[in-house]
Amino acid sequence: MNKSSFTDSKIKQLMPRQKRYSLTVDTGLSIRVMPSGVKSWVVRIPYNNRVSDITLGHFPEIGKRQACQLARRERQKYELTVPNGYTFQDAYCLWKSLKRGEIVSYVNFQRFSTPYPEVA
């Protein structure tokens, strides 16, 4: 399933398995399904060189929209908002290009290395 294909009705249909499993719903937000059938919203936060999973609540009480808002607040609390300009996606694309040897002339590199112009 795509990240955007998750709705409350599709999350309601998730069945428990023998072991717990998680499905990514949004950036940093996932739904964790326990063997008992409990569905919890979890946001993954990298903080102090560790990765922590913070439980936001259980599924029937908190819907997808509210969980996305709570996850956004947690990321803002730990100052994990994406900076304006050079993003993680840009860094990943640059790394892939360097690894593949696609950057022979630095036209592509200059596109990634220069920050986006500020909008006044």
Image (tube, rainbow, N blue to C red):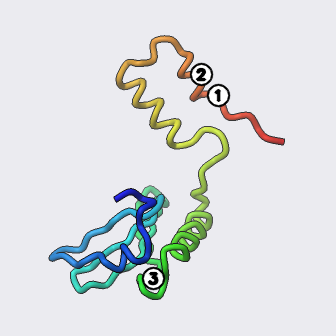
Furthest toward the left, the residue is 18
Q: Distance between the residues labelled 3 and 2?
A: 44 Å
**Residue topped by disc 2:** 110
* Left or right of 116, for residue 36: left
Neighbour tally class for label 1: few under 14, some 14-19, many 20 plus, Cα within 10 Å:
few
**Residue topped by disc 1:** 114
Mark 3 or mark 2: name the one nearer the start of the chain. Answer: 3
Could you tell me which residue is drawn at 54 percent across and 22 percent down? 109
Asked whether 32 or 5 is in front, the reply is: 5
* Left or right of 12, for residue 21: left
Per the image, label 1 sits on a secondary structure element best described as loop
As displayed, is residue 83 above or below residue 77? above
Amino acid residing under circle 2: Gln
User: Disc 2 vs disc 1: Cβ atoms closer than 8 Å?
Assistant: yes
**Residue topped by disc 3:** 57
Quadrant housing residue 119:
top right
Could you tell me which residue is drawn at 26 percent across and 79 percent down? 34
Q: How far apart are marks 2 and 1 (CA)?
A: 6 Å
Asked whether 52 or 61 is in front, the reply is: 61
Amino acid residing under circle 1: Thr
User: Disc 1 vs disc 3: Cβ atoms closer than 8 Å?
Assistant: no
